[in-house]
Amino acid sequence: MKIYVVSGLGADYKVLERLLFPEQHEVVFIGWLIPEQDEKFADYVKRMAETIDDSEPFYLLGYSFGGIMVQEINRLKPAEKVVILGSIKSDKEKSRLIKMGELTKIPQYLPVKMFNIKTLETYAVFRKFFDPKNPKVTQYFRFTDPYYLKWSVQRISEWKFEHESNVIQILGDRDIVFPIKNSKPDYIIKGGTHLFPVTKHKEVSNILKSIFI
């Protein structure tokens, strides 16, 4: 069976490359697309879902914003199981910061040029927000088109969703992006920051082997 995988906001497969998936399954990474100008989220999801062959059973796995994406894809092309790493399974689990963005619509009015990796690095926000102890955090975030980043932040702040029964959530207990206090995850990674697929890859791999049987 195929496991279709979507990585996090601005992240390529590298953030998940240390994970070991069950050998009997084929892993297919779905790369992020550049959104078309003012593209609706539903239309973007359809384009992302085109990679998936739903003529046979499959699994979905998403990390961070990728977790939101695979849940949306699951609506169009239902999977046997959906696993989300460092992500939320409904809009009720959003952090205060994300909810603030939703209420104020601030992301909508910020200029595209602000969504720039170099800007984030300059203010040391990027490293501190994801994992303050990981000096090489930016190596995992390579999809840095400013329009894509701005568009994605807007979609996260606006996202509305009810928890689906086939969604399995794995969260780190030190995740600042999606705080565990807002969720009731199926699996908790002790000492896991938002980058737990990298820093706690052995533990996560063992969990995935028990899920994807």
Image (cartoon, rainbow, N blue to C red):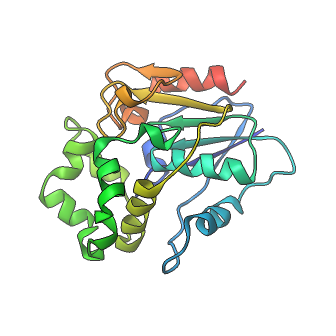
- Tell me the residue at 19%/43% (across/down): 128
Quadrant for the N terminus, please: top right
Describe residue 168's horizontal placement relative to residue 117 as left or right: right
Judge whether 212 appears above or below 98 on screen: above
Judge whether 145 appears above or below 127 on screen: below
Describe residue 13's horizontal placement relative to residue 97 as left or right: right
Residue 118 seen in this snapshot: yes
> Given the current orientation, which residue lies at the most extreme bottom position?
37
- Tell me the residue at 62%/61% (across/down): 45
Judge whether 4 appears above or below 101 on screen: above
Q: Quadrant of residue 56?
A: top right
- Tell me the residue at 44%/28% (across/down): 183
Give the mark count. 0
Q: Position of residue 67 (x, y in %)?
A: 53, 44
Judge whether 158 appears above or below 151 on screen: above
Q: Which of 197 and 92 is in front in this view?
A: 92
Q: In which quarter of the image is residue 11?
A: bottom left
Q: Position of residue 54 (x, y in %)?
A: 81, 51
